[in-house]
Image (cartoon, grey):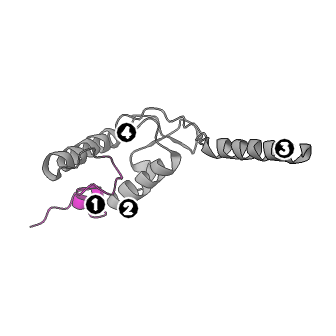
Amino acid sequence: MLITKKFKVMCVLFVFITISAAAIEPSLPKTDYKNLKVLPKDISSKDLQRIMVDEFQDGLGISCNYCHDQEKGSPHLDYASDEKPEKEIARSMMRMTMNINKQYFNVLNPAIGDTLMIISCASCHHGTPQPQLEN
């Protein structure tokens, strides 16, 4: 009888520990992005990469060095630098598309890269750095 009672207590503890461990959310790796002014400061690297590729690279047909300056004396890009004016233009364009989606398409909380956005970079740029005007 004593073994059965111990077994039950151990089973209850095991279940409790298993449920507790499953309920704990794993901590996401902390991102250390500097100088984000439009995109969320806590953006995941996956979301940032998706936005940079889907919105900018594909939507404008550009590569990273179009907006991001090179680190001094290095072949690497300085993503935090505001040296190139194209970066501030991109920020203005992000704000503009979010405002258009909110004001004219009733997107409550527009965010760059969100599938709810009706207007995106590609809406006007069509894969080119300069917006294409229709005649």
Q: Secondary structure at mark 2?
A: helix
Point 23% across, 60% down: residue: 123
- Quick check: marks 2 and 1 in contact, CB under 8 Å? yes
- The numbered mark, 4 or 2, whose residue comes first in the sequence reads 2
Q: Residue furthest bottom?
A: 135
Label 2: which residue?
58
Looking at the picture, how far across and down is residue 26, in whole percent? 61, 42
- Three-letter amino acid code at the position of disc 2: Asp
Badge 4 element: loop
Compare marks 3 and 4 and give the one earlier in the sequence: 3
CA gap between label 4 and label 1 equals 22 Å
Q: Residue at (46%, 48%) from the top-left corner?
A: 48
Q: Residue at the spot x=39%, y=34% of the render?
A: 82
Compute the Cα span from label 3 to label 4: 72 Å
Q: What is the CA distance from the residue labelled 4 to the residue labelled 2?
A: 20 Å
* First in sequence: mark 4 vs mark 1: 4
Q: Mark 1: which amino acid?
A: Ala
The residue pinned by badge 3 equals 5
Going by the image, does 40 lie left or right of 27? left
Q: Are marks 2 and 3 in contact (CB under 8 Å)?
A: no
Return the disc, 2 or 3, that comes first in the chain's sequence: 3
Q: Tag on residue 122?
A: 1
Which segment did they paint magenta? 111-135
Q: Nearer the viewer, mark 3 or mark 4?
A: 3
- Bin the neighbour count of mark 4 within 10 Å (Cα to Cα): few under 14, some 14-19, many 20 and up: some
Residue 66 percent location from the top left of the image: 39, 49
At label 4, the amino acid type is Lys
- Disc 4 target residue: 84
Mark 2, Cα crowd under 10 Å, few <14 / some 14-19 / many 20+, is: some
